[in-house]
């Protein structure tokens, strides 16, 4: 906010893999949502998921939760390791193999 209480938006150089992935999926027509995944009484909260592909995107997830989701058909992606657009491109290529 500036002195006149007007919101000013500036471009940032901070890379956000979640925003990048959401934008890329939207561009190719994949629908995603922020809903929770419920399995046998357990509730898992990905940053977002692509329900049609059973892809769940997390910022850090422990191995036990990852195993439960994987055993139930979900591909679990930890986006905390993605540092740039090249890595986003690599991930997208891997997901569509």
Image (cartoon, rainbow, N blue to C red):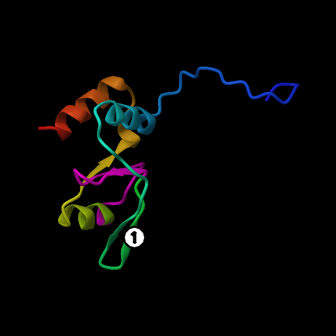
Residue range highlighted in magenta: 47-64
Q: Position of residue 33 (x, y in %)?
A: 40, 51
Name the foreground residue: 76 vs 62.
Answer: 76
Q: Which residue is mark 1?
A: 43
Residue at image location 21% in from the left, 61% down from the top: 70
Residue 54 colored magenta?
Answer: yes
Q: Position of residue 54 (x, y in %)?
A: 24, 54
Q: Secondary structure at mark 1?
A: strand
Name the foreground residue: 29 vs 37.
Answer: 29
Q: Position of residue 19 (x, y in %)?
A: 45, 36
Up/down of 61 relative to 14, above or below: below
Q: Quadrant of residue 20?
A: top left
Residue at image location 34% in from the left, 51% down from the top: 49
Of all residues shown, which one is farthest toward the bottom?
A: 41
Residue at image location 36% in from the left, 74% down from the top: 42
The local crowd at label 1, few if under 14, some if 14 to 19, many if 20 or more residues have their Cα within 10 Å, is few
Up/down of 97 relative to 84, above or below: below
Judge left or right: residue 47 versus residue 73.
right
Which quarter of the rendered picture does the C terminus lie within? top left
Of all residues shown, which one is farthest toward the front?
A: 29
Q: Position of residue 1 (x, y in %)?
A: 79, 30
Of all residues shown, which one is farthest toward the left?
A: 97
Q: Quadrant of residue 46?
A: bottom left
Judge left or right: residue 75 versus residue 88.
left
Name the foreground residue: 68 vs 18.
Answer: 18
Up/down of 11 relative to 34, above or below: above
Q: How many marks?
A: 1
Residue 88 colored magenta?
Answer: no
Residue at image location 30% in from the left, 29% down from the top: 87
């Amino acid at each position: 906010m500036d002195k006149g209480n007007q919101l000013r938006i500036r471009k940032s150089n901070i890379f956000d893999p979640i925003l990048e992935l959401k934008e890329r999926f939207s561009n190719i027509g994949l629908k995603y949502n922020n809903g929770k995944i419920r399995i046998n009484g357990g509730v898992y909260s990905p940053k977002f998921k692509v329900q049609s592909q059973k892809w769940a995107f997390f910022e850090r997830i422990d191995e036990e939760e990852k195993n439960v989701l994987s055993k139930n058909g979900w591909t679990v992606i930890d986006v905390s390791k993605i540092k740039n657009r090249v890595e986003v491109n690599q991930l997208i290529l891997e997901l569509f193999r």
